[in-house]
Amino acid sequence: MSEDTRVGAALGRLDRAIETLTQSIEKRQTRDLSVKALQDDLQRMTKERSELTGSLEKQKLRAEKLEGANAEVSRRLGAAMESVRAVLDRHGG
């Protein structure tokens, strides 16, 4: 094998090695971008979860207040109905 043939073969191997390395780098960059995107999504979802938890707590407090108000209104309506019945009973109604 001549010197030129050996150099040509070595250059061919070097070109293939560089191409393989380039492909590996591109794959790694793609994976890194995917990981970064997933990390960004996770951070966004964690923030949204925190906001939703806060909102849920506010709505729970509001619901408890409404339940309390509802109970008070029901109690007052019951008392008013009893008063109306008592008045009707006294006046023969």
Image (tube, helix red, strand yellow):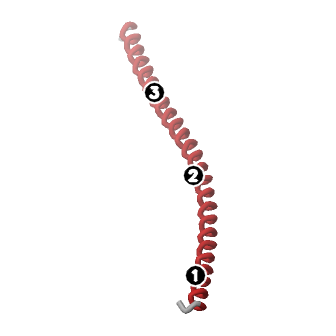
Give the residue at mark 2: 52
Q: Quadrant of the N terminus?
A: top left
Give the residue at mark 1: 81
Pick whichever, 30 or 3, lies toward us. Answer: 30
Element type at mark 1: helix
Give the residue at mark 3: 26
Element type at mark 3: helix
Q: Quadrant of residue 71?
A: bottom right
Q: Quadrant of residue 14?
A: top left
**Label 3 – label 2 distance at C-alpha:** 38 Å
- State left or right for residue 69 relative to residue 32: right
Above or below residue 79? Residue 49 is above
Q: Earlier in the sequence, mark 3 or mark 2?
A: 3
- State left or right for residue 21 relative to residue 9: right
Above or below residue 90? Residue 61 is above
Name the residue: 52% across, 37% down.
35
Label 1: how many Cα within 10 Å (few below 14, some 14–19, many 20+): few
Q: Earlier in the sequence, mark 3 or mark 1?
A: 3
User: What type is the residue that disc 3 sits on?
Assistant: Glu
User: What type is the residue that disc 1 sits on?
Assistant: Met
Above or below residue 48? Residue 9 is above
